[in-house]
Image (cartoon, helix red, strand yellow):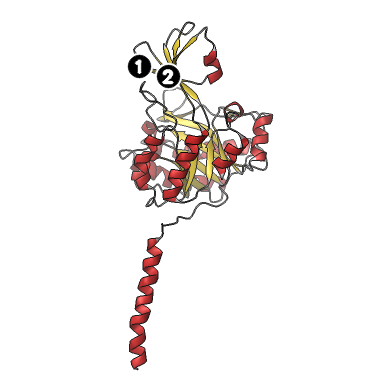
Amino acid sequence: MKLYHFTIPIVAAILIAVVSIAYSFPFKKKTPSNQQNAVYYWRTTFQLNEVEMQFLQENNIKKMYVRFFDVEPNKYWKFRDNCAPIATIEFYDTVPKFVEIVPVVFIKPEAIVEYQTFTDNMAHRLYAMCQYHNIAINEVQFDCDWTGSTREAFFHFLKEIRKSLNDYFQKEIKLSSTIRLHQLAQTPPDVDYGVLMCYNTGDFKDYKTENSILDVKDVKPYLKYLKSYDLPLTLGLPVYEWNVAFDSNKEFYCLNRFYYDDLQDTTYFKSLGNNYYEIQGGYRYFSYVRHEEVSAETILQVKDLIQKRYGKMPVALYHLDSKQLSKYSKDEIEAFFD
């Protein structure tokens, strides 16, 4: 009997010690299965060249997030709904059999508040596109820059679209969502996992912004939310370039998709240093261009900062473009995915 009473404090002490040790380690979140080595495909025509096919095979790409269409407030007479699909992708090639396709729908924040008017039609549209192009899917991803004011609408939309997709496809369709850095401070959406967008981190409309695609100083303020963020995450990293055009008053004009090589034509572009160029002629509507791309060093630095606070996670590169991917060596690409 005395032994019994003596044992209880010892057992209690051991349990307390075990619990204390467990809580002293970082909380490890469960990462989604079969998410390794993914890429985004963000063009309006699906057509892969030889280099892009080789990239998929050499880097063991298992998943491709393909933008199917965008949704914005209806400006077109031919659509009866309050919101309309635009920029629908056209498939000129068949989808590689070794890659899982995840349709992605980009929804403008001003459109999501009208979700009740288009949710079922969207599910039917996705189903019809997959049927027509013979694409078997298990997941759909939604990309929306929701904020505190539109969060409730987006969350209700996810609940309703899940039901509609399951009905049309006659099976359980997983949902994923992009997660922007500022959304880390909010309650996570009710999806199976998120893709943390570590790109478009700066204000591209500000002439003084050094690099709006990815800048370490823009990422650091959000790192504090990662440890407690209760949603499995894949890490989205940028491997693209773009040019931001400004007018004569250095006010934002547009994003321009021509390549860095084009800027070397001194007939039209005069270098001002620090990746800024002045238009010399031939372009009537804007006067200055800021060229932006992201070095492998910056990408790996951001990846390291995030994974130190969240844990190791799968990676998805944005996006598949042979010309832009050519800026990185094979070793650098492997390091992105590692």
The kind of secondary structure element at disc 1 is loop
Question: Please, what is the three-letter code of the amino acid marked with disc 1?
Answer: Glu
Work out how far the residue at label 1 is from the one at label 2, CA to CA, in angstroms: 10 Å
Name the residue located 50 percent from the left edge and 52 percent from the top edge.
Answer: 31
In this rendering, is residue 72 above or below 38? above
Tell whether 301 sits left or right of 33.
Answer: left
Disc 1: which residue: 251
Q: How many marks?
A: 2
- Label 2, secondary structure: give it: strand
**Which numbered mark, 1 or 2, is in the foreground of this view?**
1
Say if 255 sits above or below 144 in the image.
Answer: above
Badge number at residue 104? none
Instruction: Sort mark 2 into few (<14), some (14-19) or many (20+) by Cα contacts within 10 Å.
Output: some
Assess whether mark 2 and mark 1 are in contact (beta carbons under 8 angstroms).
no
Q: From this viewpoint, is residue 126 visible?
A: yes
Q: Is residue 8 left or right of residue 138?
A: left
Residue 167 image point, x, y percent? 52, 47
Residue 120 in sight in this render: no
Instruction: Find the residue positioned furthest to the bottom.
Output: 1
Which residue is nearer to you in this view: 165 or 137?
137
Q: Is residue 228 left or right of residue 194?
A: left
Amino acid type, mark 2: Cys
For the C terminus, the quadrant is top right
Q: Residue at x 43, y 44 (%)?
A: 305
Please tell me which residue is depicted at 38% across the width and 63% down the height of the picture: 23
Q: Position of residue 22 (x, y in %)?
A: 40, 65
Vertical arrangement, residue 141 with respect to residue 260, above or below: below
Q: Is 312 placed left or right of 1 in the picture?
A: right
Q: Position of residue 56 (x, y in %)?
A: 64, 38
Percent coordinates x, y for residue 16 in the rendering: 35, 72
User: Residue at label 2?
Assistant: 254
